[in-house]
Image (cartoon, rainbow, N blue to C red):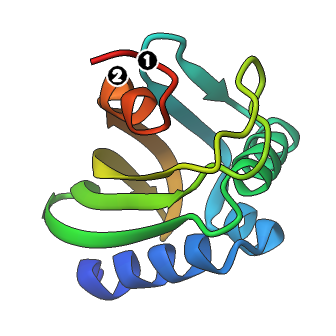
Amino acid sequence: MAVDYEMRLKEIIAVVNSHDIERVLSLFADDFLYEEVVADSTVARNKDELRARFQNLFRSFPDLRVELTSYFATGNSLCVEWISSGTHTGDMPGFPATGKNFSYREVVVIELTRDKLSRFSLYCDELTFLRQLGLAQN
């Protein structure tokens, strides 16, 4: 049976937007790679590391939302563009809360294995993000 990628992506986004960490973890295969490919890359290779990452993310940005803008799929891989937005109301490691909003595009490369996420590689413009939060100068 062919995978309905659009339906699967909408499910992934709904789960992320729910901020239900256990549901987020349930999207991932037992053997996975989660990475945020930015200046100081974040990598998680097990569910405890991933849980800590999402706890920090949802604590720092309690209104975090992602909105799908486009995607394409080939085989078991997807390339996704979405808009990530929220308000920085919780401290991040090294960055106290600013109370400022952000909204910018991110690209995510996803690989599915038996309908679970086996790779999730997020690419973003960290400088734009930090500028919007007032943590970097123009």
- Contact between marks 2 and 1 (CB within 8 A): the answer is yes
Viewport quadrant of the C terminus: top left
Q: Can you say whether 129 is above or below 87 in the image?
A: above
Q: Residue at x 25, y 82 (%)?
A: 6
The disc label shown at residue 126, or none: none
Expressed as whole percent of the image width and height from the top left, the position of residue 117 reads 52, 57
Classify mark 1: helix, strand or loop.
loop
Viewport quadrant of the N terminus: bottom left
Task: Specify whether residue 96 is in view.
Answer: yes
Q: Residue at x 44, y 11 (%)?
A: 39
| Disc 2 packing (10 Å; few <14; some 14–19; many ≥20) | some
Q: Identify the residue under disc 2.
A: 127
Q: Identify the residue under disc 1.
A: 136
Which three-letter amino acid code belongs to the residue tagged 1?
Ala
Mark with earlier residue (2, 1) = 2
| Disc 1 packing (10 Å; few <14; some 14–19; many ≥20) | few
Expressed as whole percent of the image width and height from the top left, the position of residue 33 reads 57, 35
